Amino acid sequence: MIDEIYCKGCNICIDQCPKKVFENSSKRNPKGYLVPEVSHAENCIGCLLCEMICPDMAITVEDFDDEKRS
């Protein structure tokens, strides 16, 4: 999940996700930044890299099945 209020549209999540879960979007947040979207959630492997590298702490990996990590 991307918290649009905190996201500044830096796109680090798009660049760094090993499974290309995120994509650019045309949606703007209240501050006017273009916010990425989760377009391929089924590809997520739960590495949490997006959470760790987000400079604004705007990403939370939710509802991830622990069995999928194994």
Image (tube, grey):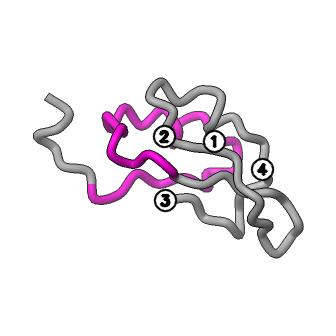
State the SS at label 4: loop
Q: Which residue is mark 1?
A: 54
Report the mark closest to the observer, 1 or 4: 4
Q: How much space separates mark 2 and mark 1, taking CA atoms?
A: 14 Å
Q: Amino acid at mark 4?
A: Gly
Whichever of callouts 1 and 4 sits on the residue coming sooner in the sequence is: 4
Q: Which residue is mark 2?
A: 21
Q: Nearer the viewer, residue 37 or 66?
A: 37
Residue, x 48% and y 24% (percent of image)? Answer: 18
Q: How much space separates mark 1 and mark 3, taking CA atoms?
A: 12 Å
Disc ID at residue 1: 3
Report the mark closest to the observer, 2 or 3: 2
Whichever of callouts 2 and 1 sits on the residue coming sooner in the sequence is: 2
Q: Give percent across and percent down for residue 16.
A: 59, 26
Mark 3: few, some, or many residues within 10 Å (few <14, many ≥20)? few
Whichever of callouts 3 and 4 sits on the residue coming sooner in the sequence is: 3
State the SS at label 3: loop
**CB under 8 Å between discs 1 and 4:** no
Q: How much space separates mark 1 and mark 4, taking CA atoms?
A: 10 Å
Whichever of callouts 4 and 2 sits on the residue coming sooner in the sequence is: 4
Q: Quadrant of residue 70?
A: top left
Main SS type for the magenta part? Answer: loop
Residue, x 28% and y 59% (percent of image)? Answer: 63
